[in-house]
Amino acid sequence: MNGLLSIGDFSRMTFLSVKTLRHYHDVGLLEPALVDDRSGYRYYRLDQVGTAQLIRRFRSLDLPVDEVRAVLTAPDESARDAVIVSHLERMSAQLRETQATVESLQRMLTTPAQLTVTYRDEPAVTALAIVEPVDASEWIPWWLGAFKELHAVLRASGLSRSGPDGALFPTEVFTDEHGELTVYVPIPASSSPTLSGRAQLVTVPAARVAVTTYDGPLVDLDHAYSAVGAWVWEQARGGDGPVRERYLPTGDEDDLLAHVTEVCWPVA
């Protein structure tokens, strides 16, 4: 075609395969300048080469097709940059997660975890709590937001806590990656807090548990679970009920990450 590039030449100039170019046409990301009605051959303009190269670079950064389209059709630089910055922030978070996993594997290879497990009877406690169904992918942000809300209710009520923060994790949370999570702050039994938002007053039931204490990166918390679970299994003392986590503060009680974690596994 006079003045147009064949798909083969366009492919060589942009490092995008013919299959990829056809896909980008199908999803409306990069339309050919012309499609021959009889042969179905696709042809491109020379000024589309830069756009194609830009698309290839964005896709090499795993920017989803819909977001690449949003960049290309952005009404101004501000809107375009917002899409790019959002994706770069996600990539940075993924890099941090990857680095944490690498460090965890190195620790497993060099310093296997040695954790002590003991029995304990947990008494029933009155508590401010938030109880909601949560997907596994949302555990951490939900956990952080829920405890911030509970701490705000505690301060507004002028109450003192009667024990460390805690959480209940039923079995289906692990087996189905979805379940009803409970986070709570123990308060005196005679308290009459002013409730707001998602907060409610609950009684966390008594239970006999096997306990181990974990102090380390969150990515390695599964070591504590495996240690206490194996101990319970070896004792043939497994019981029903959720696993409890209790968060023993190592600094400011409102600093949600300044704690060591007690993993409390139910036993018969």
Image (cartoon, rainbow, N blue to C red):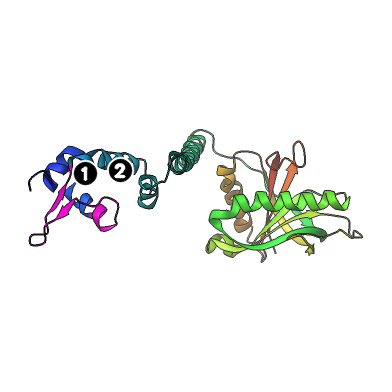
- Residue 31 in the magenta stretch? The answer is yes
User: How busy is the neighbourhood of tag 1: few (under 14 within 10 Å), some, or many (20 plus)?
Assistant: some
Q: Indicate the quadrant containing the C terminus: top left, top right, bottom left or bottom right.
A: bottom right
- Contact (CB < 8 A) between labels 1 and 2? yes
| Neighbourhood count class around disc 2 (C-alpha, 10 Å): few under 14, some 14–19, many 20 upward | many
Magenta highlight range: 23-45
Q: Is residue 25 left or right of residue 251?
A: left
Farthest bottom residue in view:
240
Residues 122 and 147: in front is: 147
Q: Which residue is mark 2?
A: 55
User: Number of labelled discs?
Assistant: 2
Tell me which numbered mark, 1 or 2, is placed earlier along the sequence. 1
Q: Amino acid at mark 1?
A: Leu
Q: Is residue 29 magenta?
A: yes
- For the residue pair 32 and 170, the one nearer the viewer reads as 32
At x 63%, y 61%, the residue is 236
Give how far across and how far down residue 55 sits, in percent.
30, 43
Residue 84 vs residue 183, the one in the foreground: 84
Residue 31, position as x, y percentages in the image = 24, 52
Residue 61: which numbered mark, if any?
A: none
